[in-house]
Image (tube, rainbow, N blue to C red):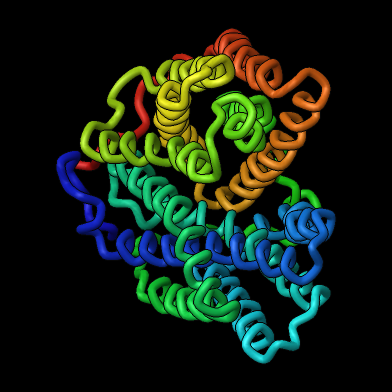
Amino acid sequence: MTPIARPWQNPFANRPFLFYITARAGSEFAYQMGVVAVGWQVYALTGSAFDLGLVGLVQFIPTLLLTFVAGHTADRHDRVRVVQLCQLTEAVAAAFLAAGSFGGWLTLPEIYAAVVLFGIASAFISPANSALLPAVAPDGQLQKATAMFTGMLQLAVICGPALGGLAYAVAPAAPYAIMTILWLIAPLLNGAIRIGRPPPAKAPQTLSALFAGVGFVRRNPAILGTISLDLFAVLLGGVTALLPIYARDILHTGPWGLGVLRGASAIGALLMTAFLARHTIQRRAGLRMFQSVIVFGLGIIVFAISPWLWLSLLALAVMGAADQVSVVIRVSLVQLATPDAMRGRVGAVNFLFINTSSQLGEFESGMTAALFGAMPAALIGGIGTVIVALLWMRFFPMLRNVERLEPEVPA
């Protein structure tokens, strides 16, 4: 059986979790490097903002089309094997980009084809990875494991793009070569995972089973409230798209200031991760989640009206910290409220909501800024986030009254 951990123990002492989080961190570093390398290369080849925008579209379409199939696959097959196959697929695509960049024969359609492979792999890997987390976390340590896991992802978000840009400056093929290596190491680490729990019963191969995750979410107010709160908070709080406008026209800083602004939120999230890894939320978890979303919205409001760089950085850091609290609680709540046999399909629904809201959130911010200006757009988003949190507290009282994030530790 999976070792039982006491609240003061470190989840890294559990080998399955250590292999899992190391593999996921390496994969996320590779992905973040790819975002920079592909974007830079496409723009260098074409000089077209439209072609650059298509990169995100061709990656998002496979995710949109395959999400429910991917969730069903995660509940029918060995999740570790699904993750390994996806990572090998990503390694093949990265190796193709490395070879084409090194040989000088890579074309725009070939880059798009590789990005489509990344999108397909991402669609399948997300629900399988999400469903694996409760299985590799020590008993009674899901909240702490979630905090550590999301902190590692934040670190990859901060460092991955910088590493990708430096590698690309050395040679266009260099970041793809590093990505290939990372995506080849990750399946080896995942292959070392040994889960001492029985595998979930296989979901039947029927159309109703394929979309069972949607029905399960709709019938469970706690999960529905958690996922929908995240959807609207991300949708309304997408100020990231406005950072270039704020950096140049409102805060009157240069590219260095934009870079600092982009990193401030992740730094706040990392600091909160370090705190939550030692001080888990022991009571009133549902209320804490709503409070963190309200603080996130208030941070947006302060950022929207701030004329000073230092205050804007502080607001973004507070937003990142508040969002990290919300993420840890949301992930833990959804995992604990979902049977293991359904975690792949419910994770697919959650992934679709998050991915869609992230894309639409940036679009909403851009459109609102075009109509009213950047400052009113950010202000509307912050106020809307606070209002949604207050409304959801009233609509989902069961969620508000959730007390603990962990089941009782077995004796």
Q: Is residue 30 above or below residue 332?
A: below
Q: Is residue 21 left or right of residue 326?
A: left
Q: Identify the image quadrant of residue 242.
A: top right
How far across and down, in percent of the image, does residue 147 sit?
A: 35, 42
Q: Is residue 283 above or below residue 217?
A: above
In the rendered image, is residue 337 in sight?
no
Q: Identify the image quadrant of residue 50.
A: bottom right
Q: Is residue 155 left or right of residue 281?
A: right
Q: Is residue 325 left or right of residue 2?
A: right
Quadrant location, the N terminus: bottom left
At 60% from the left and 24% from the top, the residue drawn is 250
Q: Is residue 125 above or below residue 175?
A: above
300 or 74: nearer the viewer: 300
In the rendered image, is residue 298 in sight?
yes
Quadrant location, the C terminus: top left
At 30% from the left and 62% from the top, the residue drawn is 18
How far across and down, in percent of the image, does residue 8 sit?
A: 15, 41
At 26% from the left and 65% from the top, the residue drawn is 15
How far across and down, in percent of the image, does residue 178 sit?
A: 48, 77
383 or 123: nearer the viewer: 383
